Image (cartoon, rainbow, N blue to C red):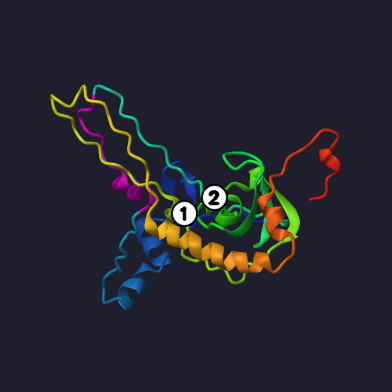
Amino acid sequence: MAAPKKSPRNPNLINGIGKFSRSKMYHKKGLWAIKKKNGGKLPIHPKKPSAAVAVNAAVVKPPKFYPADDVAKPLINKHKPKPTKLRSTITPGTVLIILAGRFKGKRVVFLKQLVGSGLLLVTGPFKVNGVPLRRVNQAYVIATSTKVDVSGVNVEKIDDKYFAKQVEKKVKKGEGEIFEEKKEEKNVLPQEKKDEQKAVDTALLKAIEGVPELKAYLAARFSLKSGMKPHELVF
């Protein structure tokens, strides 16, 4: 059911001419009572600024002159990096097989996942198979069912900054040094990293030596031989 139409207070007789006069509408609207209530004056209500006015005030006028060349504006990047999800088969102490890189085929012990990059912190240990403390992507490892107790290993200080490379300052050459042969300088490992590796290896070797044949298992390199079926292997 449609709502009834409301009739105006002063209906038009013809266009532009109302039924009631100006004085009649003054009394009909009750303006006399409002004046009497406010001491003989109609109340003044301050106008609120409209949304369009507020938007126009915020808009800055464009400059009269603009650069001749197009200036590239950087795009707003709203992407928030999500933490890397660790595979369920990889837990602290799991023995992993590295599939790529310098230590391809080596067996290493997983210590923890680095918070910043999401990479895996692993070690051989270095005394067993020559693999130092390294960062490895979990896409390039195979998790085995072998576990090592790493509760006694403290790696809280090691993070992504531990593996940051030192930036070398470039030295300007003089006139006489341009044609001189550059001497190759060997990168020397800082003593702090050597001490950290020794501390991790010492704690890890105690746990490894307590399990028979585990040291030999970690020292052996993984490889496939003829006749072996990779899809049937149980790691």
Observer able to see residue 11: yes
Quarter of the image that includes the N terminus: bottom right
Residue 71 coordinates in the image, percent (x, y): 30, 29
Magenta stretch encompasses residue 45: no
Q: Quick one: SS at disc 2?
A: strand
Which disc number belongs to residue 160?
Answer: 1
Q: Quick one: SS at disc 1?
A: helix
Seen from the viewer's position, the closer of residues 1 and 74 is 74
Task: Please indicate whether residue 96 sits to the left or right of residue 74 in the image.
Answer: right
- Which residue: 53% across, 63% down? 200
| 227 versus 189 height, above or below | above
- Amino acid on which the number 2 mark rests in the picture: Arg
Quick one: label 1, few (<14), some, or many (20+) residues within 10 Å? some
Quick one: label 2, few (<14), some, or many (20+) residues within 10 Å? many
| 127 versus 169 height, above or below | below
Residue 55 coordinates in the image, percent (x, y): 35, 47
**Mark sitting earlier along the chain (2/1):** 2
Q: Nearer the viewer, mark 2 or mark 1?
A: 2
- Please give the residue where the numbered disc 2 appears in the rendered image: 135
* Distance CA(mark 2)–CA(mark 1): 9 Å
- Which residue: 31% across, 72% down? 35
Callout 2 touching callout 1 (CB < 8 Å): yes
Question: Which stretch did the figure color magenta?
Answer: 50-67
